Image: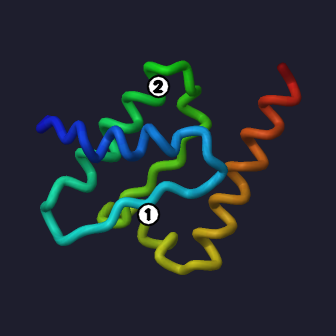
Amino acid sequence: MMERRAYLNQLVSWKDQDIIKLVSGVRHCGKTTILKMYQEYLLNSGVDQSQIISINFDDLESEELLDYHKLYQYIKDRQYEMTRRKQKK
């Protein structure tokens, strides 16, 4: 995996901000690599895997999430699951 430290540092600087992190760019410029590096950083920092939502829209498994209503519902369901897990602890 190619290091993209400057981009990773930008994501890390927004870590505890209550905003969605989005990486965009042309095809094959390293977006997935940066996001995988960020996920590794989060996991190594103690973030539980269940708190990370990662969707690859190139996978056929995610095809139905191209419909924004279904995507919204998927994210809301994941948030609900995460909230329930926190309450049980």
Q: Looking at the image, is 45 positioned above or below residue 83?
A: above
Q: What amino acid type should be assigned to the residue bearing mark 1?
A: Ser
Number of residues whose C-alpha sits closer than 10 Å to that of mark 2, classed few (under 14), some (14–19) or many (20 or more)? some
Q: Which residue is mark 2?
A: 43
Q: Which residue is mark 1?
A: 62
User: Horizontal and vertical percent for residue 22?
Assistant: 43, 60
Q: Residue at x 55, y 19 (%)?
A: 46
Q: Quadrant of residue 85?
A: top right
Would residue 53 be found to the left or right of residue 33 on screen?
A: right
User: What's the distance in space between the residues labelled 1 and 2, CA to CA?
Assistant: 23 Å
What kind of colouring is applied to the model shown? rainbow
Q: Residue at x 44, y 56 (%)?
A: 55
Q: Residue at x 58, y 69 (%)?
A: 71
Q: Residue at x 42, y 71 (%)?
A: 63
Between residue 60 and residue 18, name the one nearer to us.
Answer: 18
Q: Looking at the image, is 87 positioned above or below residue 27?
A: above
Number of residues whose C-alpha sits closer than 10 Å to that of mark 1, classed few (under 14), some (14–19) or many (20 or more)? few
Q: Looking at the image, is 49 positioned above or below residue 89?
A: below
User: Horizontal and vertical percent for residue 16?
Assistant: 60, 39
Between residue 27 and residue 50, name the one nearer to us.
Answer: 27
Dots 1, 2 in contact, CB < 8 A? no
Would residue 89 be found to the left or right of residue 2 on screen?
A: right
Secondary structure at numbered mark 2: helix
User: Horizontal and vertical percent for residue 44?
Assistant: 44, 19
